[in-house]
Amino acid sequence: MVKRANHVGGRRKPSGNADDSGVPASDRRADRLRIRAAWMYFIEQMTQSEIADVLGVGRITVVRMLAEARARNEVQIAIESELSEIVRLERALETAFDLKQAIVAPLSRPDADPIPAISARTGAFLSDAMRPGMRVGVGWGRTLFSTLSFITPKSLADFKVISLLGGVGVARHINPAEFAWRFAQAFQGEGYLIPAPAVVDSVETKVALIERCGLQDIFRMTDDLDAVLLSIGGIRSATTFYRGGFLKEAQREELVARGAVGDLLFHPFNVDGKIVDHPINSVVMSVDVERLRKAPIRILTSGGPEKIEALIGAMKLLAPTVLITDEESARRMIELRDKSA
C-alpha cells in the first residue's frame, strides 16, 4: 500500500519554481505521479500497462516509478499519508465520471475558500499541459482569472487562444477578453476575441453580428480546437452570470423553477446535463456546447459548496476529460452521485 511521499505539493507561488520548503515544482509533480502509480498498482491492482495508459506515460516509466517507491520505502502495510486521501478522491472521481484525469486540491479547512487552491492546481496543470501549435478555447470567471498568477510563463510557437464568450460593456477586473488575452500572453501566443457583448438585446442582433460583422470567422475557429478551458457558475449563488448584470433576479428565479443548477458560458443547464429551455439562450454571444465537446481535451476547473449540483450536471453536459476541483467538492460530488445511484 502507499505511504506518505517525502514532498507533498502545496500551494504554488505566483512566481518561482519552489514552494516555501524549497522543493522544486518538478519534484513535487514527480512525487505526485509516483504516488498515483503506486496507488493504482498496490491498491487497485492495476497492471503496469493499464497504469501507463491512465497516466499517459510509457510502461518502462511506470516500472521505474514503482521501483523508486519501493526504494524510498513508500510502500507499507498501512496508508499513512494525507496525500493518500487526495489520491483516493481523484481515482474515485475518475472512475465515477469517466475522467481521464482528476486533480483534487487540498484545503486548509473544510470551510476555506476553494478558489485559491483550485487556481493553484489549475495553473500548475496548464503550465505543463499547454504545447506548441495548440488552439485553446477559454471561458472566464473568478476561478479561471485567478489561475493566471500560478502559470509559469513560457514561449509556445503557433499557440492560439480563442475566447468562447463575448465581452462586457463595463471594464471589470474579471472580463472574458482580459482573461483570454492574458492567458495568450503567458505563452506568448495569439489571442482571438469575440468583439461583442456577452448578451445582446435580440436574436436579430445576434444573427447580424455573426453573419454581417465578421464574427463567423471567430466561431469557425472553435470547430477545430485542441482543448477547451472552462469553469461553471452555480445558478443559486452570486456568480459572474448575474453578478455582472447579465441575468436579472426574475430571470434567475425562472431558471431555478425550470431546474437550472448552473451555467456554462451563460448557457443554463440542469443536474442531468441538459440545457434549460429559456430565452436567454438565444441572445448569448457564446460558443454552443456541441462545439466544445468536439475538443479532445476538455478541462473543467471549479468548486465550492454552491456548485455541487452544477458540477454533477457539467459532467454530463461537457463530458470533461480533466476535472480540477477541491477536496470538499470532490467528496460531495461522489456522495451525491452515490446517493442518486
Image (cartoon, helix red, strand yellow):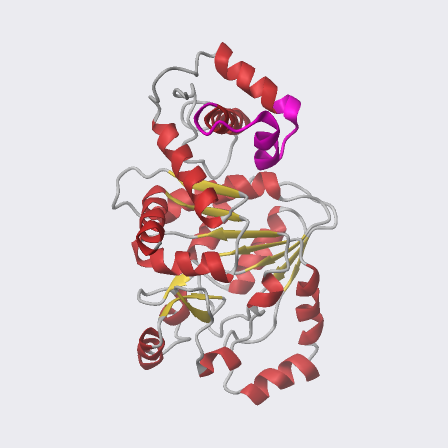
Q: Is residue 39 left or right of residue 331?
A: right
Q: Position of residue 122 (x, y in %)?
A: 49, 44
Q: Does the segment drawn in magenta span residue 54?
A: yes
Whether 125 is drawn above or below 202: the answer is above
Q: Position of residue 212 (x, y in %)?
A: 69, 84
> Can the viewer see residue 231?
no
- The foreground one among 7 and 53 is 53
> Which region of the structure is painted magenta?
42-61
Q: Is residue 296 left or right of residue 167?
A: right
Q: Position of residue 317 (x, y in %)?
A: 49, 62
Q: Does the segment drawn in magenta span residue 126?
A: no
> Can the viewer see residue 44?
yes
- The foreground one among 270 and 29 is 270
Q: Position of residue 14 (x, y in %)?
A: 47, 39
For the point 52% across and 27% down, which residue is it? Answer: 37
Q: Quadrant of residue 294?
A: bottom right
Whether 132 is drawn above or below 56: the answer is below
